[in-house]
Image (cartoon, helix red, strand yellow):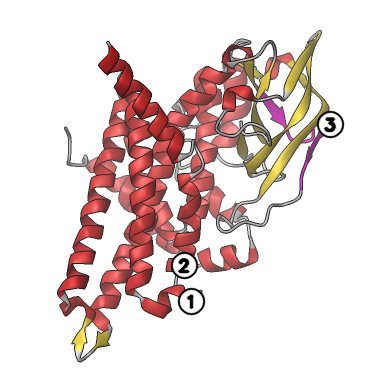
Amino acid sequence: MIFQLSEEQQAFRDTARQFAAEAFAPHATEWDEKQIFPVDALRAAAALGFAGIYVREDVGGSGLKRIDAALIFEELAAACPSTAAYLSIHNMAVWMIDRYGGEAQRKRFCPKLATMEHFASYCLTEPGSGSDAAALATRAERRGDRYVLNGSKAFISGGGSSDVYVCMVRTSGAGPLGISCIAVEKGTKGLSFGKKERKLGWNSQPTTAVILENAEVPVENRIGAEGEGFKIAMAGLDGGRINIAACSLGGARACLDAARAHMAERKQFGKKLSEFQALQFMAADMATELEAARLMVHRAARSLDASDPDATLHCAMAKRLATDKCYEIVDRALQLHGGYGYLKDFPIERHLRDLRVHRILEGTNEIMRLIVARKLLRQSNN
């Protein structure tokens, strides 16, 4: 167990914190209210190496570890969880190409994605297959040197704005072994998008359906072999779960800090809120749960870095606990602010709205429990 950060980790954590305070925090409220996709701010983050954090350096990535990514996403999300979360999804998609793509694909796609000259989206969920991802119905029929794709993807972050859509499609029979991974490029004939979704939170990133109608894509855009798509998608989600959990840590930490400051200033019944024991206990529980969640996220990240056979289990545990507990921390921070916490003049309500979806995406927390239970009970049966 390693609890201390290296000097290098402290340096890029501090860089991420300063960048987030200067480039994200002053604009986050406007991005949320006006539904602005902050392209320039994202490209500035990419200039610091935050768009290909664990992508190999030969194609423009930073070549860092999952634990390093967790540190960075926590800092970025403390300023704007929505924007940090899009960046985390982009990182996941780029890594999938870097890890499973051939050399020609890596060199064609990854450099522009690492600088965010191009943006990426991850396309798994469909209108008829959410948690049951292996039941996806979007088909890719091979015709010579091309695939013809038909179907649609739902709730796609970056939909309509991204340049590369990493899509899971069915190339053969039912079940996970019939799924392949294909990169669909912006401008492909037959690729279109649904309306921009109106959401509770995550308003600084566009979300749409991705629609494929006889969309022709070169076979050379297939990532990995036919039938490997589900494996690739699940490998991407292990890291994605750590990333989104880290974004929850950042949002919760920002709200805890705001609550502490409010308690030190606000007076009721002639005393500061920080002098009431009941509220002291509430703050103590919030801090303890945040630290426990952080430890689980970092453990999962190190497990994935080490290719631990239980890495998927650790990622599911960390994602479930961190996203649940961090949402509760934000809710209690809002409660400590009283009516002020409910106002858009303060950032807590934005964090509350943004963090709520973390318990749904990258696998719902019910699916995280299912992953844990299957592993736990399989071990018991053996």
**Which residue lies at the image location 61% right of the left edge and 37% below the top edge?**
120
Q: Quadrant of the C terminus?
A: top left
The residue carrying mark 2 is 349
**Badge 3 vs badge 1, beta-carbon distance below 8 Å:** no
Q: Earlier in the sequence, mark 2 or mark 1?
A: 1
| Amino acid at pointer 3 | Gly
Give yes or no for residue 191 being in the magenta stretch.
yes
**Badge 2 vs badge 1, beta-carbon distance below 8 Å:** yes
Q: Earlier in the sequence, mark 2 or mark 3?
A: 3
Give yes or no for residue 371 being in the magenta stretch.
no
Location of residue 358 with respect to 28 vertically, above or below: above
Q: Quadrant of the N terminus?
A: top left
Front residue of 312/56: it is 312
Give the magenta range. Answer: 182-194
**Which residue lies at the image location 64% right of the left edge and 66% below the top edge?**
34
Front residue of 152/64: it is 152
- Label 3 secondary element: loop
Question: What is the CA distance from the residue labelled 2 to the residue labelled 3?
Answer: 40 Å
The residue carrying mark 3 is 190
Q: Give the class, few, some or many, for how many residues have Cα within 10 Å of label 1's Cα (few <14, many ≥20).
A: some
Q: Residue furthest top?
A: 144
Quarter occupied by residue 222: top right
Q: Residue furthest front?
A: 381
Left/right placement of residue 203 relative to residue 292 reads right
Q: Nearer the viewer, mark 3 or mark 1?
A: 1
Q: Earlier in the sequence, mark 3 or mark 1?
A: 3
- Point out which mark residue 343 bears: 1
Question: What is the CA distance from the residue labelled 2 to the residue labelled 1?
Answer: 7 Å
**Which residue lies at the image location 59% right of the left edge and 22% below the top edge?**
134
Q: Position of residue 104 (x, y in %)?
A: 62, 17
